[in-house]
Amino acid sequence: MATPAPVQTLDLSARFPGVLNPDTRPGYSGWILDSANLLEFATALRDELGYDYLSSVTAVDYLPDGKMEVVYHLYKTTGGTGVVFKIQVPRADPIEVPSLVSIYPGAELQEREAWDLFGIKFTGHPDLRRILMWEGFAGHPMRKDWREPYFEEEAKPLKSRWPDGKIIMAESKNLYGDNIAYPGGFNPESQTFDPEKALYEALRKYQKDEIGLDTDHILVNMGPQHPSTHGVFRVAVMLDGEKIVNLKPVMGYLHRNHEKIGERNTFIMNMPYTDRLDYLSSMSNNFGYALAVEKLMNIKPTERAEYIRVMMAEMTRIANHLMAIGALLNDLGAYFTPMLYALEERELLLDIFEGVAGSRMMCNYFRFGGIARDLPEGMFQKIKDLFFERLPRKIDEIDRFLSENEIIRSRGIGQGVLTAEDAVKYSTAGPLLRASGIPYDVRRAEPYSIYDRFEFDVVVRTNGDIYDRLMVRFDEIRQSIRIVQQAVKQLPDGPVMALKPMYQVRVPPGEAYGRVEGPKGELGFYVVSNGKPTPWRYHVRAPSFINLTAFGPICIGQKVADVVAVLGSIDIVLGEVDR
Amino acid sequence: MSDMYGKGILKGLGVSLKRFVETYLDDLSWLGRRYHTAKGIAHRGSKDARGIFTVQYPEEKIPLPEEFRFIPFLVYDEGPNGEKPLRCTSCGICAKVCPPQCIWIVRSTDPATGRPIPDPAEFYIDSDICMNCGLCAEFCPFDAIKMDHDYELASFHRNIYDETRLSKSARYYASIRPVNARREDAAQAAKAASRTGRGE
C-alpha cells in the first residue's frame, strides 16, 4: 500500500521540518513539497532513509485547480511500504520541475513521458525529448484541455449511442478515410522540419574520440520493422566498428494514449483495455488494476476469488516466461524449435484461460470485488492434472534442452551485464532486477492479495548477464508451479463476487496505487478518482517500458550483435511499452 | 561447466530426438485415429499429449469451451406462430457499458402517445470496433444479448451488423451455452413463480 505507515509519518516530518506538508485532501496520502526542496529531499530519502528504488514518476493535471502535480512513488529494495510525495506547480507554461535523473536515473524515460504527454519541463534532464509522440507533435495530449480530431465527448458512455443511436464514423468525415485533422494551409511538401534531428544529436553527444584520429561513428537504425525487436520497436545505435558507443530506444509506434482512453472510460470499461497492455499476460494486468480500484472503493474480494486470482496470475507468469524463453532463444539463433516446445505448454495454459475467461489472451476476467465467473465444470481437475502431472516434467525437459547448450552459454554468460547497483539505480523490475542479485519481488516485499499465505522462494541470480536472466525465468516458473499447487490444495468454496455485479461502480474520491509483481516486473496502476463515473487520472507503471531505461547502459561497450540478445533477455511487449 | 565441449548440445539434441520418435510412436499407437476424430483432437490438447500438437485447421477444429466469446448477438424466443420477438427492451445498458462504444440503439416510441416502448427500433453493432470483452452480455438484465461462438468472420469490407444480422434464436443460444442457458432459464422460472405466488 502506498500510504506511509504511522511510524514513518513521524520520522519524515521530524526529519524535514517545514519542507513537508501532509497531503490532506480526502482519500489522498503522502506528502506535498516545494519544488525548490525536491533534490535535497530526494537525496536524503535515498542516502539516509534507504528509499533506493524509484518506482513511478507521473503527473496529474488538476485543471479545475489550475495546478499540475508530479507524483513520485519510492520504495526500499529491502521491502516494506513506500513513500509518496508530490510537487505542485501552477499550470501556466512553462511548467518546470527539477529532474530527478541525477539522483534516480530510473526517472529518465518516465520524466520524458511526463514531458511528452503533460508538457512538464524537467530542468536538468540530460535528454528531454518526446518519447511516445513524435517531435513536432502539437500539444501535450494528456492535458485535460487537449482534444483529438473529431472529439466527441469528454466521457463515456457517449450520448449519441442511446436512445436515438446514429452511426457517424469518424473516418467518414475525412477525405482520406482517416481520423486525422490537418491544420488549415498544411502542406506536407513544404515541411522542412527533421523530426529525427534531436535523436541523432542526443546519440552524438556521447561521442568521444579517444586517440585523436579523425574518424566518425556509424549510426545504425534497427527497426522499427525488424524481426528481433519483438514488435514495432526501434533502436538507434551509434557504433565504433562493432562496438556500441551509444544506444537509444525509440518507441511509440504502437502508441494509442491508453491513459487518455482510460480517463474517458468508466472504471469497469478499463478492465478489458488493460488486457491490451501486456497482451501476453492479461490476467496480471487485470490484477493490478483491480487492486488499485478496490483500494479506492475499500472493498476486498471473496476468499475463493482471491485464490482463483492468484492461480490465474501465476499461470500467466508461466505462460509469459515460456514465451520469453522461446523468444530469447529465437534471438540467439535457435530458430523456433525451443519456441515451439515452450508454446506447447503455453497452449495448455491458454486453453485454461479460454475455458475460464472466454478468451485466450484478452481475458478480462477480474472485477472489482472478485472475478467475472467461477471456474466452469471440470476446469479444476484440468488445472490440477496440468500442474501436478505435466508442467513440472515439461519445464525440466525444456531446461535440459537449453541450459547446458554451449552456444547459449557462450552467448549468454558474461554478456549484457547489469550490475546490482545499476539495476536498482535504473528502476528495473522483475526478472531483470532479480538476475542482477536483488531479491526484490512485490509478492514478498509488500504482499498483496493472499501471497503471504503461500510458500515460495524469491528467485535470485547474481551475475546479471543474459544467461542468468534466462535461468531466473526457469526458476520463477518452478516457483509459480509451487504456488498454483498450493492454491489448488487450499481452494475454498464460496461466492466469487463480494458485491452485486454493477455496470457502473461508485468510486469515492481519492488516489490509489495498486502494484503487482507482473511477469515482467512491478506493474503499477495509479488511479485518481474525483467521485465521477470515470477516473480523473489513470496511469500505468509499465515494467517493460521502465526496464528499457537500462537497455542503453547494458549495451554500451557490447558488440552490436548482442543488442538483439540483450533485448530478448529484457523481455518487452510493445503493447505495454508504447501504451 | 560441462567437462566436454558440445555435451550440452548433444543432450539437447537428445530431447529433440525423443520428441521426434514420440510423434511417430503416438501416431502408431492411435492406429490412424489420432487425426480428424474428436477424441484425437481432445488428446492433443490434454495433459497426456505427446509428440506433435498441431491441429489441422480448418479440416480439424479445437472444440470451443462454453465461455468462449466473440461478437455478440441478440436472442429471440420463438413464438408458436413463428414470431421472433427479441428479448431486448432497448434499456441501453449494453450501449452504456460497451468500452469501445460500438453499440447503437434507436428506441421505439409509441406512435399514438409518443412515449418510448421497450422494443428496439434499430440495433447496430460495429463489429470491426467490438473488442469481444463480453461486458454487454454480462450486464444485460434480460439475457437478451449474448456472446457468440462464430469466429470465422473474415471479410473485405466494413462490418456493421444490424438487427437482422444480429438476431439468433434462444435454441441456438442454448446449443452453444447449455450450462448458462439452463441456469438462466431456471432463474427466470423461479422469478416468475415468486411473482405469481405474490399475486395470489
Image (cartoon, coloured by chain):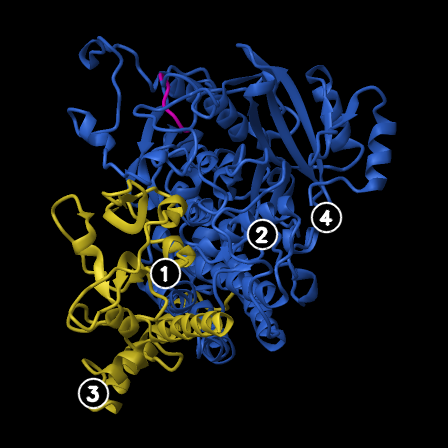
Q: Which mark is residue A79?
A: 4
Q: Nearer the viewer, mark 3 or mark 1?
A: 1
Which quadrant of the view contains residue A481?
bottom right
Q: Residue at position x 18%, y 47% from top?
A: B159
Q: Which residue is mark 2?
A: A517
| Residue indicated by mark 1 | A359
Give the residue at x 73% y 44%: A81
> What type is the residue that disc 3 sits on?
Arg
Residue plotted at (19% across, 71% down): B56
Mark 4 is on which residue type? Gly
The answer to whether A17 is drawn above or below residue B48 in the figure is above
Q: Position of residue B105 (x, y in %)?
A: 28, 44
Q: Chain of mark 2?
A: A
In the image: residue A310, left or right of residue B102: right
Q: Position of residue B185 (x, y in %)?
A: 38, 73
> Which chain is assigned yellow?
B
Q: Is residue A575 left or right of residue A46?
A: left
Q: Count neighbours of disc 1 (C-alpha within 10 A) and say few if under 14, some if 14 to 19, many if 20 or more.
A: many
Residue B37 coordinates in the image, percent (x, y): 21, 83
Q: Residues within 10 Å of mark 3 (few under 14, many from 20)?
A: some
Identify the element where label 2 is drawn.
strand
Q: CA distance from mark 3 to mark 2?
A: 44 Å
In the figure, A243 relative to B132: above or below? above
Q: Which residue is at the front of the view, A561 or A194?
A: A194
Which segment did they paint magenta? A132-136
Residue position for label 3: B33
